[in-house]
Amino acid sequence: SSYTTYISARINEEQQKFEKAIQQYKALLNLRNHPYKFQSALRLGLLYLRMEKTKDALSAFRTASRLNPRTDYYDSVALEYLIATTSSNKVDERGQCIRSKLY
């Protein structure tokens, strides 16, 4: 089920099995009609940011923005911040700042 895959991806991410988690998040993004698409895209972006893959992170954040159900104000604001920061000209400096606060 999509729930099981999402939980497994989160566990793999926490265990620093990043490539496995990336595969699972991408698989979830390719499925239709399940409630974890937004979360999968957001987690994928955060994971790429953690791995210092800023272009991939920005792409995932933009996907999350398109999928955002806008039911949580704070998710929306955080996502806007992540997109703005990741797409700025000071990606490395700001990205490092974000990574140090998240991890």
Image (cartoon, helix red, strand yellow):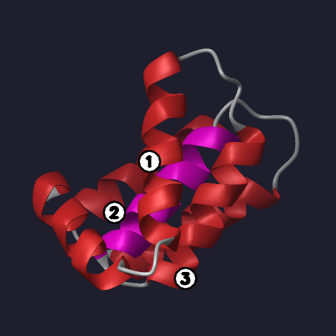
Examine the image and state in which quarter residue 101 appears. Answer: bottom left
Badge 3 crowding class, 10 Å Cα cut-off, few under 14, some 14 to 19, many 20 or more, is: some
**In the rendered structure, which amino acid carries the disc numbered 2?**
Asn
For the stretch drawn in magenta, the main secondary structure is helix
**In the rendered structure, which amino acid carries the disc numbered 3?**
Lys
In magenta, the rendered stretch is 37-50
Please report the residue visible at 32 percent of the width from the left and 62 percent of the height from the top. Answer: 13
Query: Given contact means CB atoms under 8 Å apart, are the residues at marks 1 and 2 in contact?
Result: no
Residue 85 horizontal/vertical position (percent) = 41, 62
Q: Identify the residue under disc 3.
A: 55
Examine the image and state in which quarter residue 39 appears. Answer: top right
Q: Identify the residue under disc 2.
A: 12
> Helix, strand, or loop for circle 3?
helix
State left or right for residue 54 relative to residue 65. Answer: left
- Mark positioned earlier in the residue sequence (1 or 2): 2
- The numbered dot on residue 51 is none
Q: Identify the residue under disc 1.
A: 81
